[in-house]
Amino acid sequence: MINKGNVRGVILAGGSGTRFWPISRTKRPKQFLSISQDNESLISATARRLVPLLGQESIWVVTNIEHKPLVEEHVPYARIIAEPVGRNTAASIGLAALHLRCENPQMVMVSLPADQAVKDEEALRRTLQAAIDAATETGQLVTVGIPPTSPHTGYGYIKQGKPGVGRTFQVNRFYEKPNFERAKRYVEAGDFLWNSGMFAWKVETILKAIQEFMPQLHEGLMRIDAVLNTAREEAVVAEVFAGLESISIDFGVLEHARNCAVIAAEPFGWSDVGSWDAWAEHFTTDENGNLLRGDTVVVDSRNCVVHSEKSLTAVIGADNLVIIDAGDALLVCPRGKVQDVRAVVEELKRRNRRDLM
């Protein structure tokens, strides 16, 4: 069992949620949106699920300085680490590890994205407890793998190796998001898991791995460590982050490390809510499979996702469309193309349409 005093939950809330444009914007990204009938935000739900396992006092959130007020609103009990600029998960995790090490050099970190959905919360907590126990006992970098239910092309995959301690397996290899045919082979092989982005490790273990595989990041973190909790901290963090490469912990460390283990999650109904299509799965549809939110009228249409923020949106004779009206911007795309919504944000950036980003 976990000693709660030696474990902290770190929620990574720096993402921009570009695949949820036009509702998700720079000033209020995906993690602050709701997919539940009671309007609980994704980040609020993520933190709440951790509380029975670790306690409110053990919840930390890493976010962009711009979103600190939103985190304070949605997770008022969390301790917040505010980054001056987003540099992806390797930098966020490294910075969090420094703060946790100040509390206790033997601290174990369990790290989760802020924007995932879970149906069976008790099963999630049992899985996280098993991952934390494995990280504590073995000193390995432990990741939570999700048994795949389909050849999904929007997730990374992990190939299991030899059995390890408890429910863990050694990681044979990490694979990036595959095409459909390759994903189908992975699922049929039976020894692949989806990469959930949930991890458990001792803070010293992850900092040593960063030192080995990301020396530039480690050098910057040591500069921050020297001024942590002093008047100079904010300025040094800003200077260091300005020069850091933007890279995930998966690319920067886990794909190279030799001490990685994976634990297969219990079936807790996991989703990374990575698109409007996935978002729609969490709401009730009408008799024709349409998901309707806001002021909408739908006639002779099937399997559509229609969301209207401010005005009436009417749809006639449509099949398998996503229609999202944010008031100042409208998205229309086939449900099979929802993973490409981020391309709109890239085009807006190219056109310098900051008002719509």
Image (spheres, grey):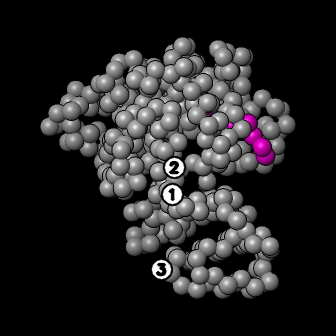
Q: Nearer the viewer, residue 176 or 292?
A: 292
Three-letter amino acid code at disc 1? Answer: Glu
> Within the image, what quadrant is residue 268 found in?
top right
Magenta span contains residue 145:
yes
Q: What residue is drawn where x is 61% and y is 73%?
A: 293
> Closer to the N terminus: mark 2 or mark 1?
1
**Dot 1: element:** loop
In this picture, which residue range is highlighted in magenta? 144-150
Three-letter amino acid code at disc 2? Answer: Ala
Three-letter amino acid code at disc 3? Answer: Asp
Few, some or many residues within 10 Å of mark 3 (<14, 14–19, 20+):
few
**What is the number of the mark on residue 328?**
3
> Within the image, what quadrant is residue 81 found in?
top left
Q: Is residue 275 above or below residue 229?
A: below
Q: Is residue 289 above or below residue 123?
A: below
Quick check: marks 2 and 1 in contact, CB under 8 Å? yes
Few, some or many residues within 10 Å of mark 2 (<14, 14–19, 20+):
many
Question: What is the x, y in percent for residue 165?
Answer: 64, 14
**Dot 2: element:** helix
**What is the number of the mark on residue 40?**
1
> Closer to the N terminus: mark 3 or mark 2?
2
Q: Is residue 270 visible?
A: no
Residue located beneath label 2 in the image: 45
